[in-house]
Amino acid sequence: MKIRFWGVRGSIASPGPATARYGGNTTCIEVRGDDGELIILDGGTGIFPLAQALLKELPVKANVFITHTHWDHIQGLPFFTPLYIPGNTVRIHGAYDVVTGAGIEQVMNVQLQYSYFPVREAEMRAGIEYETLNLGEPVTIGGVTVTATLLNHPVVNLGYRVECKGKSMFFTGDHEVWYNIYEPEDEGFEEYARLIAEKQEAVADAMRGVDVLIADSAYTIEEYPAKRGWGHGTFDSSLAMARRAGVKRLYCTHHEPTRSDDDLEKVFAAALARNPLGAGDPEVMLAREGLEITL
Amino acid sequence: MGNLTPELERKLGMAVERMPAFPKSVQKILELTRNINCLPKELVAVIEKDPVMTLKILRVVNSAFYGLPNKVTSVNQAVVYLGINTLKNLALSFAAVGILPGFNAAGFDTQRYLVHSLTTGVLARQLCQKYGQGQADPGDCYIAGLLHDFGKVVFALFLAPEFSHAMALTEARGIPLHEAELEVIGVEHGYVGAMLAAKWQFAEPLVECIRLHHVMDAEPTAMLDCLRMADQIARQRGQFITGTPYREDEASVAPERFGADPAAVAASLGDLDKIVAEAMAFVEVQ
């Protein structure tokens, strides 16, 4: 299995000299199975440079898995060049949205409205398929299986576990570790604490023992209190999650758009200094655009 | 028990999609959500007092798309699974359907209904904590109480003439409402409420509890006992009856669990007036 980061930035693309080392594109991760199966996790602006690379290997059979439909995870989809080339197939997977009552087939609709984009979906020449996922049912693509888990974000967000021939990775998409909505003196506090504990255990099971965990680590613990409920993790919460699930390597991603490369390294070093790694702990590193991992 | 024609079953099943929530919940949801930093627990407190919103949220979170290993039976659980922002937007979409009219063609008083349901829910939870520990979940008993009569609202809104006739029959002949419903509609409200709950894949014990609450020879469970006792106490105490009035000669519920003296059970729950007053305050019944 191979993993390559095409976009590691959260919220909005942030090009410029201050972000040149880690990259300014929003979320997109390419995962390859041993037989070349192509899995693309999220379609942020990073999917555009990936699209350019794919033009060298037509026809493309792409399996896109959308963690959730916030802009920074779907914005690049209409620019995914293989969509325009006959003979390619692009299968887009994602969650059912309870609020709109629609499946993942709506993911490009908004972006492709007449006022916002010149091409209609009907004019895209690739075979485009949609699959709204039922949770707990693994999707098989050649020798690869992808399993979705419900995580915590202000819209339905799926984390994906990808497995191929004994190797595995998990990507959280955007995820904030649950917090208790009650105060300790409230009647509902204990019940809620119990529900959270159950859910965290279930998520740890879903990530259990993966070779690579890629986790939303947008904030520092100093920044977090002002952003509670926004649906993102911290370096510390991601490390705690990785330890609990016994993963081998953790990549922190969803870098803040306002954070320069120097600052990113500084806050990351501070988080590591606060949480010294011992035996049995995962390796921890920052996700960087262009970084390729071979498992 | 009873039978529904497939046509009627389809009609009732679809009807609930369009069913509006209660006026006070809609008003509170709109108020709360104007503030981007509204407290999640305040939102939950409003949603879990409204049978329509509670039903719709449990229906969504239990749908096949989420394939959850266990059925979700509480609003708090739904928050953990779906996130508070999604719940907020769901509640807003339910609020946008409109408000349940206080007066409907059937002449069924929905505000009274809500006071009775809230009171029964709170009492069922307390009874479970006191008399059914370890045998049922108090939160599930609350939901059972909140939703047990939901079939009546469905009747009132979507089978108004028949339901109105059944209510008149209850009064004229002094028979229980569920018997009158069986006679006029062919099914009683427990059956219809359970049919909908089953269709939405609610937890089996909850579905059974709603279905059986007027089926006297049903196999008792802790949840069913607590629901029936709560219902009886609520009817005995409250003037907010939307069905069968309490009769002095009613048999006491599950004496093997609660003892032979229902009055002692009611007394053991503390200040019932306060529970009823809180329910009334929420519904804003004058």
Image (cartoon, coloured by chain):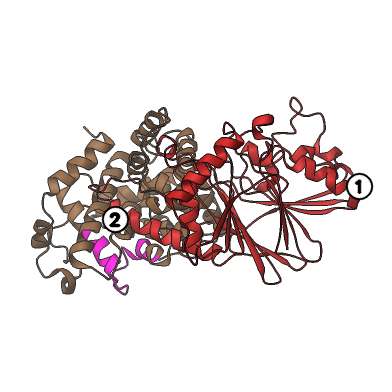
Q: Determine whether the residue tagged by mark 1 lies in a helix, strand or loop.
A: loop
Q: Is residue B221 magenta?
A: yes
Position of B274 relative to B216 (above/below)? above
For disc 2, the marked residue is: A190
Whether residue A133 sits left or right of residue A32 in the image: it is left
Q: Look at the image and give the residue range highlighted in magenta.
A: B208-231
Which chain can be seen in brown? Answer: B
Instruction: Name the residue tied to disc 1.
Output: A86
In the rendered image, which quarter contains the C terminus of chain A?
Answer: bottom right
Of residues B279 and A62, which is closer to you in this image?
A62
Q: Secondary structure at mark 2?
A: helix
The residue sitting at 81% across, 61% down in the picture is A36
Near-viewer residue (A284 or A177): A284
Q: Earlier in the sequence, mark 2 or mark 1?
A: 1
The tint of chain A in the picture is: red
Quadrant, the N terminus of chain A: bottom right
Amino acid of disc 2: Glu
Label the magenta part by its dominant secondary structure. helix
Q: Quadrant of residue A169?
A: bottom right
